[in-house]
């Protein structure tokens, strides 16, 4: 096994893929915890699908699709975050419309673009084995931005996640920090799409924190556990997918989802005897 792994990671593309998985795991573990605890998975889904509009526009005008995805995700993040803060009652409908517009724009401009477009499928389904040095630099930059942002605003983010009324009483700049958090989600979506694709990026953001949250309630512990879970399943999924000749993103997400379901079932089974014992007592 050790010799197999040493041979496997002797290839430069596998080392790049492993590094990409580690960097994305750090960003998703931290940012995904904020998504789960603040219950804004729908906004994250909207951002992920809206980002495809940037991919299509950039490809049509001859720019790097990743750059287009970054720009579109930041704009859509700010728009969706602002709508959610100011019009909570109708935000789901408006975000759903933005979600649809982003996907439609991306599909239309890609169809209008001349030439062979197979590479664009990697943005939908991921292509961790084909990450470039530029992708790795972007992943590192966004992971560092996420770390600095969370360290600097940790107490406010903690209050927002568990007791938003406290932030209002303290007169904290809650809207600005909230929009900063939403923008960070958008940037994390962009780097994650190279690993699992825009279609499954929400799973990468939410499953590890949701799994950690089954057993932990402290936000810092959930973040650390989420990073560890993401690193573990991304690494194992990468190795298995290469050995079985399967799509890496799908294998990674399937492993995470299976672990979450098993943990959920196991937790329910452990609680049932306790509840029955109390009922009999």
Image (spheres, grey):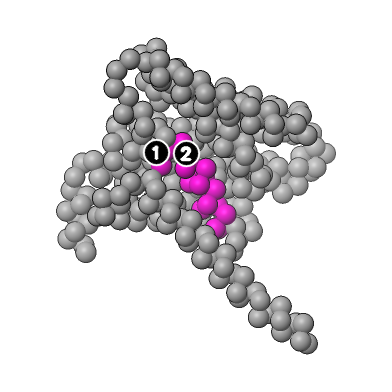
Q: Which mark is residue 199?
A: 2
- In the visual, does 153 lie left or right of 124? right
- In the visual, does 253 lie left or right of 161? left
Secondary structure at badge 2 equals: loop
Which residue does the image show at 52% across and 60% down from the upper left?
Answer: 260
Q: In this orientation, which residue lies closer to the viewer: 112 or 233?
A: 112
Which residue does the image show at 78% across and 34% down from the upper left?
Answer: 89
First along the sequence among labels 1 and 2: 1
Q: Is residue 104 visible?
A: yes
Of the 4 image quadrants, the one containing the N terminus is bottom left
Q: In this orientation, which residue lies closer to the viewer: 111 or 83?
A: 111
Q: Residue furthest bottom?
A: 281
Other residues around mark 1 within 10 Å, as few (<14) / some (14–19) / many (≥20) = many
Which residue does the image show at 78% across and 87% down from the upper left?
Answer: 281
Other residues around mark 2 within 10 Å, as few (<14) / some (14–19) / many (≥20) = some
| Image height of 232 relative to 171, above or below | below
- In the visual, does 130 lie left or right of 278? left
Mostly what secondary structure, the magenta segment?
helix
Say whether marks 1 and 2 touch (CB < 8 Å). yes
Residue 175 position within the rendered picture, expressed as x and y whole percent measured from the top left? 71, 30
Which residue does the image show at 31% across and 35% down from the upper left?
Answer: 131
- In the visual, does 173 lie left or right of 36? right
| Image height of 253 relative to 130, above or below | below
Q: In this orientation, which residue lies closer to the viewer: 216 or 105?
A: 105
What residue sits right under mark 1 in the picture? 125
Magenta highlight on residue 211:
yes
Residue 236 position within the rendered picture, expressed as x and y whole percent measured from the top left? 34, 56
Q: Which residues are magenta?
A: 196-212
C-alpha distance separating marks 1 and 2: 6 Å
Secondary structure at badge 1 equals: helix
């Amino acid at each position: 096994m050790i010799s197999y792994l040493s041979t496997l990671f002797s290839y430069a593309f596998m080392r790049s893929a492993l590094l990409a998985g580690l960097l994305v795991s750090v960003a998703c573990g931290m940012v995904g915890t904020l998504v789960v605890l603040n219950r804004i998975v729908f906004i994250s889904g909207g951002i992920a699908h809206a980002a495809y509009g940037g991919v299509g526009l950039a490809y049509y005008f001859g720019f790097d699709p990743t750059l287009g995805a970054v720009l579109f995700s930041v704009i859509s993040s700010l728009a969706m975050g602002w709508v959610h803060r100011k019009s909570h009652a109708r935000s789901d409908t408006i975000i759903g419309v933005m979600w649809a517009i982003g996907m439609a724009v991306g599909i239309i401009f890609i169809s209008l673009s001349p030439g062979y477009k197979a590479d664009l499928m990697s943005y939908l389904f991921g292509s961790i084995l084909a990450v470039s040095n530029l992708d790795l630099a972007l992943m590192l930059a966004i992971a560092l931005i996420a770390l600095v942002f969370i360290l600097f605003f940790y107490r406010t983010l903690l209050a927002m996640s568990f007791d938003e009324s406290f932030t209002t009483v303290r007169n904290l700049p809650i809207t600005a920090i909230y929009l900063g958090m939403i923008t960070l989600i958008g940037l994390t979506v962009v780097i994650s799409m190279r690993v699992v694709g825009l279609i499954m990026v929400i799973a990468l953001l939410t499953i590890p924190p949701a799994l950690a949250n089954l057993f932990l309630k402290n936000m810092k512990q959930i973040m650390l556990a989420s990073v560890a879970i993401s690193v573990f399943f991304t690494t194992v999924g990468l190795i298995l997918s290469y050995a079985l000749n399967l799509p890496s993103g799908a294998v990674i997400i399937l492993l995470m989802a299976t672990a979450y379901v098993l943990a959920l079932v196991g937790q329910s089974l452990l609680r049932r005897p306790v509840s029955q014992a109390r009922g009999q007592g």
